[in-house]
Amino acid sequence: MKILEKVVESVMDGNVEECEKFVKEALQEGIDPMEIIKKGLSKAMNIIGEKFQRLEIFLPDMILAADAVLAGIEIVKPKLKTKNDWKGEEGKVVLGTIQGDVHDIGKNIVKIMLETSGFEVFDLGRDVPVDRFIEKAEEVGADIIGMSALMTTTMVYMPVLIKKLKEMGIKNKYQVMVGGAPVLPAWADQIGAEGYGEDAMAAVEVAKRLMEERKKKEIRHD
């Protein structure tokens, strides 16, 4: 399993080529693809996230690490038995940066963290209209709708989406998560969002909690 330690180190160094090399070596050694994701790629991003929270590293380091993880995942994906072997176990998330906002670095990191944690993510990109979030959520049968904003001027569209879901009578079908630099927990509560993620690590924890709560409700209703 020493090769997985090298995978972790390569991600933390933000070295895409090294990460790809060690992931390939791990596969050649016969290590299960899910083990590579969980004990290599995902583990590394968790460590990176913790360091970021403690201000031991900064956003450029986070971005480089995310690039390395993404490269590693692309190598592992074809080796998995089915699509659902590596994602979708936890739930489906429709993710995007809200309309008017073209900042997507944070959203991209959240996407990788969610995918390596077992979620199937439908990434709509940036500057996503409110209606597009809803259309995609309905299309794929999403569990969670995740919106990010990097500007206070675009945050105003978050409550618009929640209001539309209520007007359409489908709000109970989705858990809504919000995040981004100007977004605060109080704002999330005020607009009626079920979840708030301060950073990528927190977003994963919140998403898992929301799915656990959802499953418990479904069991009670059964």
Image (cartoon, grey):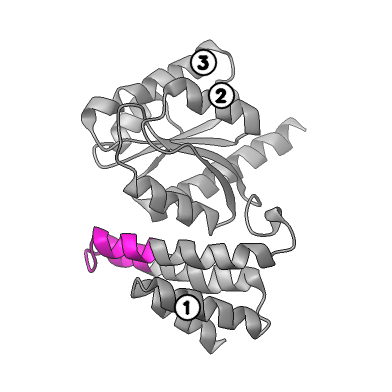
> If the image is split into quadrants, where does the C terminus sit?
top right
Q: Position of residue 43 (x, y in %)?
A: 47, 70
Residue 56 counted in the magenta span = yes
Report the Cα–Cα distance between label 3 and label 1.
Answer: 45 Å
Identify the amino acid type marked 2.
Answer: Glu
Type of amino acid under label 1: Val
Q: How many numbered discs?
A: 3
Crowd around label 1: few <14 · some 14–19 · many ≥20 (10 Å): many
What span is colored magenta in the figure? 48-66
Residue beneath the point at 64% across and 49% down: 88
Query: Picture quarter containing residue 193?
Result: top left
Q: Label 3, on which residue?
A: 166
Evaluate whether residue 198 shows in this view: no
Tag shown at residue 7: 1
What label does residue 75 carry, if any? none
Element under label 3?
helix
